[in-house]
Amino acid sequence: MTNTELPVAGPDTARLRDALLSASFTADGVLELLGAPAYAALARNETVPALRATRDGSPTAVLIRLFLLQQPVPHGRAAAALPAAVLDAALADGWLRRDGDEVRATADVRPFSGPDGQDWWIVSDLGCAVGGTAGSRGRDPDVVLGVGGASTTLAGITVDGPAARALDIGTGSGIQALHLSRRAARVTATDVNPRALRAARLTLALSGAPGAELRQGSLYEPLRRAGQGAEPERFDLIVSNPPFVISPPAPPAAPAATGGAGRLTYRDGGMAGDELCRALVRGSAAHLTEGGWCQLLANWEHTDGQDWRERVAGWVPAGCEAWIVQREQQDVTEYIELWLRDAGLRPESEEYAVRYDAWLEDFAGRRTRGVGFGWITVRRTGASGAGAVVAEEWPHAVRQPLGRTVREHFARREFLRGHDDAALLQTRFLLADGVVQEQIGEPGAEHPEHLVLRQRHGMMRAMTVDTVAAGLAGSCDGTMTAGTIVDAIARLLDQDPVVLRAAAPDVLRSLVQQGFLLPAGGER
């Protein structure tokens, strides 16, 4: 499937948006008509249940068939789903095209619910609105994807709060720029792919969002070109879901019989190894305001002889601190197979074997044995030298959204750097929301074998604690200092208060670092 010409955003786009709303072609409306099983199947790119559910010819059903299922519909049904003037404008602007007595869509338009219940629509290439690319084989390199798991992950971890200026690098269909438009006074979105910039403009216009400033170019290059003065452009928030796939620099020519799948702009950055993600992190400091944030999804290589934490932490520029979270790791064979399937290649094809071998050769040249998937958050502190970097593996479940969790992670680290042991004991703390205590042991036993504190929000961490730490955490309601609570626990357990006070700061630091305790009085 080659890409079709995308529509244009014109003065009639707002009227089309109103018509989609009137026809209940929204995330809630689609779910209601399809039902949960068919809706979930559609996300897996299984269309048969949705086709069965849309046979009634209602306006919502017609629009689902047009824009999500890429089915032609009779012109008369399209005219019943959209007002005549809107249908004519949609044909004129290229959202639809006439094919005899039938009408077809030229782009996928996916209803999407914003974080505050907004009705949005994400515009992408045909076949890319739901279920990913459904195999990119035969597509042009500049194919534009819709919303996938990576898109929603990045939106979920983006720090909360307002921003004067925000930047979306590698905007694709514009989903991150759409999220940023809620909170930033000015949004700039860039992409190396001009087709993606056109899709992003359509997404913003159809969703009724303020228009972003769209610039073409790779990584930070559009900012260097635009900034003519000595000072680089700076932003309060930079986000990026970049083409992070670590692929060979130049895929070998595919055998003619296979119709080969080449490099795809949305996923293949064209740099060796994980250099693209490294360049995004390294270049962030020059374009962040004081206290500004850069957040991206990334892949990084696990190489022989070096811990991945040390390697990726080395990307963080001077004057910045960072939190690096590895969510998954694959060995090189699993990784290659994942992205060959994404390109629509089948194991039985000759091209599959050729590209698989070339990929292994590329990894071997850098002594790469695996690839990590995760997210990186960088915060510019302005301090001289290297800042604090936390790099951890966390493959366990989390509870999105995590924007507040990310911001509080850095605030707690800053608090701990400014408080020695004595100051910690003089601080009043609060038990974080959603923390519960579990007791593990044999049924009927007088004392539990383990006490576990568990978070039900955010990172959903669990921490095994002793009786003292559990008592300390449970007593932190913001009314007493930690030292006062420790003294009370010592009296209750008939233990030496001097000994407990000496051990308490390490316990407090661990509880604060992992988000079980928060400083009271807004001191975070």
Image (tube, helix red, strand yellow):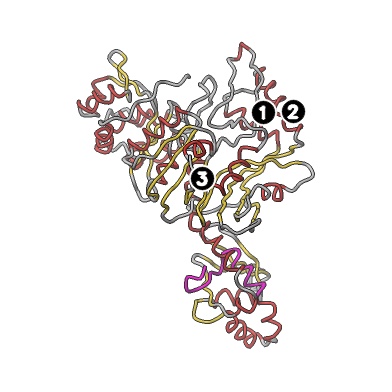
The residue at 53%/25% (across/down) is 136
Residue 180, percent from left and from top: 42, 46
Q: Counting residues from the N terminus, which is met first, the one under dot 3 or under dot 1?
A: 3
Label 3: which secondary element: loop
Query: Does residue 450 sit above or below 492 in this rendering?
Result: above
Separation of residues labelled 1 and 2 (CA atoms): 9 Å
Task: Please identify, in this view, whether the residue under mark 3 or under mark 1 is nearer the observer.
Answer: 3
Q: Residue 232 carries which label?
A: 3
Query: Residue tagged by mark 1?
Result: 248
Residues shaded magenta: 505-524
In the image, residue 260 sits, relative to residue 68, either above or below, namely above
* Pointer 2 with pointer 3, Cβ within 8 A: no
Residue 435 location, x and y as percent? Answer: 53, 66
Residue sitting at x 50%, y 29%: 133
Q: Do the residues labelled 1 and 2 touch (CB within 8 Å)?
A: yes
Q: Which residue lies furthest to the top in this view?
A: 257
